Image (spheres, helix red, strand yellow):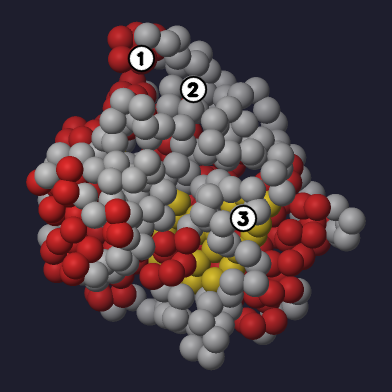
C-alpha cells in the first residue's frame, strides 16, 4: 500500500456549473484547490486527473435511459426532460452537463480502484460527494452519484464490506437507495431532521431492506440548531460501534460542509473546528477497521463558498495526506488575494472558527428528555437490535 495520499483534481471539474444564480458555485472548488496549493499540500499527495466515467461504469448505478436523458440535455439544455429531474430549479440543464458530471464520477471511481489495488491508502475527491442523484433521476444539485458509483466499483472488484459515512447536513438518500438491499454495504447518515430539510428522508426507521439487508442503513436525524457538542456526541454515539461490528474493507466518507453555522441553506450550527474533528475521526476509523487504512473521502454540499468550504476541505486533504494544517495558522495572503480576485470578497484569515469543541461520550449516560439524545436513541433502537447489538 502506497504511503502517499491521492488527490483527484482536474481544472475541468469547475465546468460542473448550474449558472450564476445557483448556490452550488464552482468557485468553491477553485478556491479549495487554491488553498491546498497555498499550504503546499499538493506536494504531499499525488495529484491525479482521471478520465470521465464511461457509460458502462455509469450503468453500475444509473439506468441506461437516464444516462441517455442526461446526454440529450447536455447537448441541448432546452430539451431537458423534467421527468428525469433535469431542467428543474435545483438541477438546471447546461451545455456539457454530461461531460462535467461524468468527470466528477470518474475521479471517485478511479480513486476507489486505486485504493482497492493498493496504489494509495487514502484518496480525496472534494468535487465529489454528489449523494442525492438517483438511479433514474437527478436531484438536489446532483446529476451522477459518484459516491454510489465508487462503492459499486469496489463491489465489482471483489469487496465484500464497504461502509459509507455521510455527514452532510442533507440525508445521503441516493447512496442509501442504491444499496438498500445489499448487505455488503453499510450506509450511515447524520443529517438535519427530514421534517425541516430536503430531501425529507433519513428517518431512524429507515434501516435497510427487510430480510436481506436489515440493519444495513442507519440514520441520525438531528434537531435543527444542533451545534458542535451535539453533532460530535451523535457521531461518536453511533458510528464507531457500527463500524466495529461491520468491519469494512474500505471506508467511504462524504464531508458536505453545509452543517456549518454560516451555511445559507440549512439550520445546524456546527463549526469548522468540529468538522475537522470528524474528518480526523474518519481517518482514525479507517486505520482502525480497514486493511491498510483504505479511505475515500468526498466533498458534498456547502454553500458558504468563501468562508467555509475551502477551509473545511483543505483540512480534509491535509488529514488524508498525513500533513494536517494547524488550525491556528494564518491563511496565506496569496490565497486571500485569489479570493478577492475571483469573488470580490475578503477571505477568512485563519483555519479555525476559534472553537475548542467538547462532547460527552454516550457511555457517560443520556438524558431521555434531551432532543439530541432522543435522536440518537431512536437510531440505536432502530438499527442496533437488527445487528445483534445492545441499544
**Residue 244 in the image: above or below residue 112:** below
Q: Nearer the viewer, mark 2 or mark 3?
A: 3
Above or below residue 247? Residue 283 is above
Q: Is residue 318 visible?
A: no
Q: In this view of the protein, which residue sits in the foreground, 198 or 258?
A: 198
- In this picture, residue 311 sits left or right of residue 219: left
For the point 79% across and 56% down, the residue is: 373
Is 30 located above or below residue 217 in the figure? above
Quickly name the residue at label 3: 194
Along the line of sight, the residue nearer the viewer: 128 or 90: 90
Residue depth check, mark 1 versus mark 2: number of the one nearer the observer: 1
**What secondary structure is found at the residue carrying circle 2?**
loop
Name which residue lies at 56% across and 82% down.
214
Q: Position of residue 213 (x, y in %)?
A: 50, 83
The residue where tag 2 is placed is 307
Mark nearest the camera among 3 and 1 is 3
Seen at 35% across and 14% down, the residue is: 343
Mark 2 and mark 3 lie on one chain; the one further toward the N terminus is 3
Name the one closer to the observer, 360 or 377.
377
Q: Are marks 3 and 1 in contact (CB under 8 Å)?
A: no
**Residue 24 versus residue 50 in the image, above or below:** above
**Identity of the residue drawn at 41% across and 49% down:** 140
Q: Position of residue 313 (x, y in %)?
A: 43, 36
Amino acid at each position: 500500500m502506497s504511503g502517499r495520499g491521492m488527490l483527484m483534481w482536474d481544472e475541468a471539474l469547475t465546468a460542473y456549473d448550474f449558472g450564476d444564480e445557483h448556490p452550488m458555485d464552482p468557485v468553491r472548488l477553485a478556491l479549495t484547490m487554491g488553498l491546498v496549493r497555498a499550504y503546499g499540500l499538493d506536494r504531499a499527495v499525488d495529484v491525479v486527473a482521471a478520465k470521465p466515467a464511461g457509460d458502462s461504469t455509469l450503468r453500475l448505478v444509473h439506468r441506461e435511459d437516464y444516462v441517455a436523458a442526461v446526454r440529450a440535455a447536455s447537448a441541448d439544455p432546452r430539451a431537458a426532460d423534467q421527468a428525469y429531474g433535469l431542467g428543474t430549479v435545483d438541477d438546471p440543464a447546461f451545455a456539457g452537463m454530461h461531460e462535467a458530471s461524468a468527470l466528477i464520477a470518474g475521479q471517485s471511481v478511479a480513486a476507489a480502484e486505486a485504493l482497492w489495488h493498493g496504489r494509495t491508502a487514502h484518496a480525496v475527491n472534494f468535487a465529489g460527494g454528489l449523494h442525492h442523484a438517483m438511479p433514474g433521476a437527478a436531484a438536489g444539485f446532483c446529476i451522477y452519484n459518484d459516491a454510489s458509483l465508487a462503492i459499486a466499483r469496489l463491489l465489482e472488484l471483489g469487496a465484500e464490506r464497504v461502509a459509507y459515512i455521510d455527514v452532510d447536513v442533507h440525508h445521503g438518500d441516493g447512496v442509501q437507495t442504491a444499496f438498500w438491499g445489499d448487505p455488503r454495504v453499510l450506509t450511515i447518515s447524520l443529517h438535519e431532521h427530514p421534517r425541516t430539510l430536503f430531501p425529507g428522508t433519513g428517518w431512524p426507521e429507515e434501516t435497510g431492506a427487510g430480510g436481506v439487508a436489515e440493519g444495513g442503513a442507519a440514520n441520525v436525524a438531528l434537531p435543527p440548531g444542533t451545534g458542535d457538542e451535539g453533532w460530535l456526541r451523535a457521531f461518536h454515539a453511533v458510528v464507531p460501534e457500527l463500524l466495529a461490528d461491520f468491519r469494512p474493507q474500505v471506508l467511504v466518507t462524504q464531508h458536505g460542509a453545509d452543517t456549518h453555522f454560516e451555511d445559507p441553506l440549512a439550520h445546524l450550527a456546527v463549526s469548522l473546528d468540529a468538522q475537522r474533528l470528524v474528518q480526523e475521526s474518519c481517518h482514525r476509523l479507517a486505520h482502525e477497521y480497514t486493511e491498510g487504512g483504505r479511505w475515500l473521502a468526498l466533498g458534498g454540499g456547502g454553500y458558504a463558498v468563501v468562508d467555509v468550504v475551502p477551509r473545511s476541505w483543505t483540512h480534509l486533504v491535509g488529514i488524508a495526506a498525513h500533513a494536517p494544517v494547524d488550525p491556528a495558522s494564518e491563511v496565506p495572503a496569496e490565497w486571500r488575494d485569489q479570493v478577492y480576485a475571483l469573488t470580490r470578497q475578503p477571505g477568512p484569515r485563519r483555519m479555525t472558527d476559534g472553537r475548542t469543541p467538547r462532547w460527552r461520550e454516550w457511555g457517560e449516560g443520556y438524558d431521555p428528555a434531551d432532543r439530541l439524545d432522543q435522536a440518537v436513541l431512536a437510531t440505536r433502537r432502530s438499527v442496533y437490535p437488527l445487528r445483534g447489538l445492545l441499544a
